[in-house]
Image (tube, helix red, strand yellow):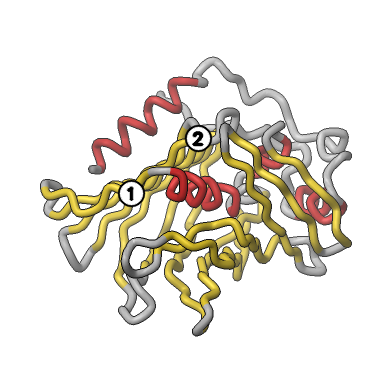
Amino acid sequence: MQRLFEKERAREINRYSNITSSEIFSESDIASLPEPVQKYFKVCGYIGKPKIFNADVIWKESFIKLSPEKGWTKLETKQFNSVIEPVRIAYMKALSMPLQVRDIYRKGQGQVYGKLFNLIPVVNAKGKETSQSALITLFSEILFIPSYSLQNYIKWKPIDSLTAKARFIHKDIDVTGTFYFDEEGKFIRFETNDRFYNEKGGKFVKKRFSAVADNYKEKDGLKIPSKVRIIWHLENGDYEYFKGEIDDIIYNVRFP
């Protein structure tokens, strides 16, 4: 499973290997963005830094809760994102059981594929609902890799000084979400009603979903989110199903 992740990551890196990172973010690039998104670029130090076409997200630690009733399972997580054509690939290995999962969004298609002992397939989720949900996971992260915010597939709508709404249109998927910022200008929460929750019995139902950035750290002159939580807001209470700490985000990854 890890080999599959590395193969797909390599393919995406090679796909845009001719791109240079000589262009930098300027204030004119962000002039059309809503006020709080512009402030985020400035406060987090992206103005004057190279524009981003891909990134490795380095997770220091991560945990998943496989159902509301279960406890936390510790994971080893690796993640790669590409911007020009939106791609997100994640590899997760449970440290307390022989389970490995690859989660991907690419070319308008999402898939969650998991194996026990790296041999026995236990999940192979795909289809409209899975693809839309995979895109929304990427959507929630667009300010972690802020070049996403400037792409044609993202349409912004201003709300107020602390809030902006965005629409993500890619292939046959069209979803919206709201981004919230603190007074300093840092992104703190993403919310949407367009993600599908897989209920018992395999029924997909749209539920309110949020991603929360609880803390930031400084790396190479940039402020990046460090602690992240992913939450389903269900009728009987909140179900926090993923949490983790980001150690670093390495932008513009290339092969030696």
Front residue of 182/66: it is 66
Say if mark 1 contacts mark 2, CB within 8 Å.
no
Residue at which label 1 appears = 125
In space, the residues marked 1 and 2 are separated at their CA atoms by: 14 Å
Q: Residue at x 17, y 49 (%)?
A: 121
Disc 2 is placed on an element classified as: loop
Residue 61: x and y, percent? Answer: 39, 63
Q: Residue 108 shows which numbered tag?
A: 2
Disc nearer the start of the sequence (1/2):
2
Q: Residue at x 56, y 29 (%)?
A: 85
Q: Quadrant of residue 52?
A: top right
| Callout 2 amino acid | Gly
21 to 244, vertically: above or below: above
| Callout 1 amino acid | Ala
Disc 1 is placed on an element classified as: strand
Residue 84: x and y, percent? Answer: 60, 29
Q: Quadrant of the C terminus?
A: top left
Residue 48: x and y, percent? Answer: 77, 37
Front residue of 181/221: it is 181
Locate residue 156 relative to residue 125 in the image: left or right.
Answer: right
Locate residue 134 relative to residue 161 in the image: left or right.
Answer: left
Task: Give the tally of numbered discs.
Answer: 2
Front residue of 148/127: it is 127
136 to 243, vertically: above or below: above
171 to 178, vertically: above or below: above
How many residues crowd around disc 1 within 10 Å: few (fewer than 14), some, or many (20 or more)?
A: some
Front residue of 96/156: it is 156
Q: Residue 168 shows which numbered tag?
A: none
